[in-house]
Amino acid sequence: MFRGDMNNLIQTLIVKYGNVTKTAKAFSVSHTAVVKWKKNGPPLHIALLCHLSEDIPYIFNPSDYSVDNKGLKLNLE
């Protein structure tokens, strides 16, 4: 399930924010969580946030998360 483009996303985030600790702070998660992203890939909600950001060059691929044929329910309140 973990693909190279997700690894590129993690590296992009670390470069953008400066290091793992600052990346964790930007997404309100622990340092350990970001380290785990390197191994397992970022969670779906992080990938979607990155896709929606104009500052992060990432295009969400539903197949990376096995949601190709599933409707994503987004609450935009």
Image (spheres, rainbow, N blue to C red):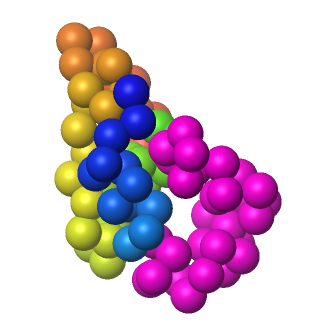
How many numbered circles are shown?
0
Residue stretch in magenta: 13-42
Q: Nearer the viewer, residue 72 or 37?
A: 37
Side (left or right) of 68 relative to 1: left
* Quarter of the view holding residue 63: top left
Residue at (37% x, 60% y) in the render:
9
Up/down of 62 relative to 43, above or below: above
Q: Is residue 69 visible?
A: yes
User: Can residue 71 be seen?
Assistant: no
Q: Is residue 30 above or below residue 55?
A: above
Picture coordinates of residue 44, whole percent (x, y): 46, 37
Q: Residue at x 26, y 30 (%)?
A: 62
Give left or right: position of 38 versus 49: right
Q: Single out the residue that lies furthest toward the bottom.
A: 18
Q: Position of residue 31 (x, y in %)?
A: 76, 64
Identify the residue shown where x is 51% and y is 46%. Answer: 42
Is 55 above or below relative to 29? Answer: below
| 38 relative position to 31: left or right | left
Q: Residue furthest top?
A: 69
Does the magenta segment cover residue 20? yes
Q: Is residue 39 left or right of residue 44?
A: right
Q: Residue at x 39, y 27 (%)?
A: 1
**Residue 54 image-quadrant placement:** bottom left
| Spot occupied by residue 40 in the image (x, y as percentages of width and height) | 55, 39
Front residue of this view, candidates 23 and 74: 23
**Image position, residue 23 (x, y; %):** 60, 73
The majority secondary structure of the magenta stretch comes to helix
Q: Does the segment drawn in magenta span residue 74?
A: no
